[in-house]
Image (spheres, rainbow, N blue to C red):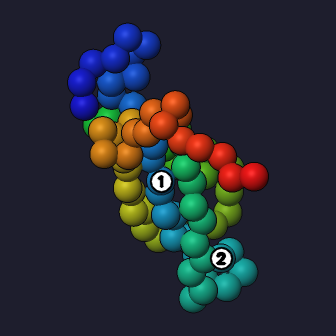
Amino acid sequence: MTDTVDGTEDFRLTTAEILYRMPDYPDLIQSYLWQSLDRLPDFPKLQEFLGFWERELQGELHSVRIGYVGLIQPAEWHDSRSMSTLQ
């Protein structure tokens, strides 16, 4: 991704699927989805959230799967002047 004027060149829309064990039912694994704009490659917001999870919540983390996409991708950007409305 190229540098942008507002400094968002390292940010990506980040989604994390967090699998954790239920405190009362350790054999049961639940899923939690977390999403935020985060900076590559260290994902500081996600790291902060996972630290909070481990400090404050009782559900033991099983695994975390991360996916991310750029803010604006050339193939997905549409000029609003070329769109029309239905009446």
In the picture, which quadrant includes the N terminus? top left
Between 82 and 59, the one nearer to me in the picture: 82
Residue under the image location 57 percent in, 61 percent down: 33
- Circle 1: element type: strand
Residue 76, placed above or below residue 5: below
Between 63 and 67, the one nearer to me in the picture: 67
**Left or right: where 50 falls relative to 70:** right
Task: Report how many numbered discs are placed on residues in the image.
Answer: 2
Give the percent coordinates (x, y) of residue 39.
39, 32
- Give the spatial CA distance, label 1 vs label 2: 21 Å
Q: Is residue 30 visible?
A: yes
Disc 2: CA contacts within 10 A as few (<14), some (14-19) or many (>=20): some
Q: Is residue 37 visible?
A: no
Residue 61, placed above or below residue 46: below
Amino acid at pointer 2: Met
Disc 1: CA contacts within 10 A as few (<14), some (14-19) or many (>=20): some
Between 5 and 42, the one nearer to me in the picture: 5
Amino acid at pointer 1: Thr
Residue 74, placed above or below residue 67: above
Tag shown at residue 22? 2
Q: Residue furthest right?
A: 87
Contact, CB < 8 Å: mark 1 with mark 2?
A: no
Give the percent coordinates (x, y) of residue 54.
57, 53
The image quarter containing residue 83 is top right
Tag shown at residue 52? none
Residue under the image location 33 percent in, 28 percent down: 10
Give the percent coordinates (x, y) of residue 21.
58, 75
- Circle 2: element type: loop
Residue 23, placed above or below residue 74: below
Label 1, on which residue? 15
Residue under the image location 37 percent in, 55 percent down: 67
Q: Residue furthest left?
A: 2
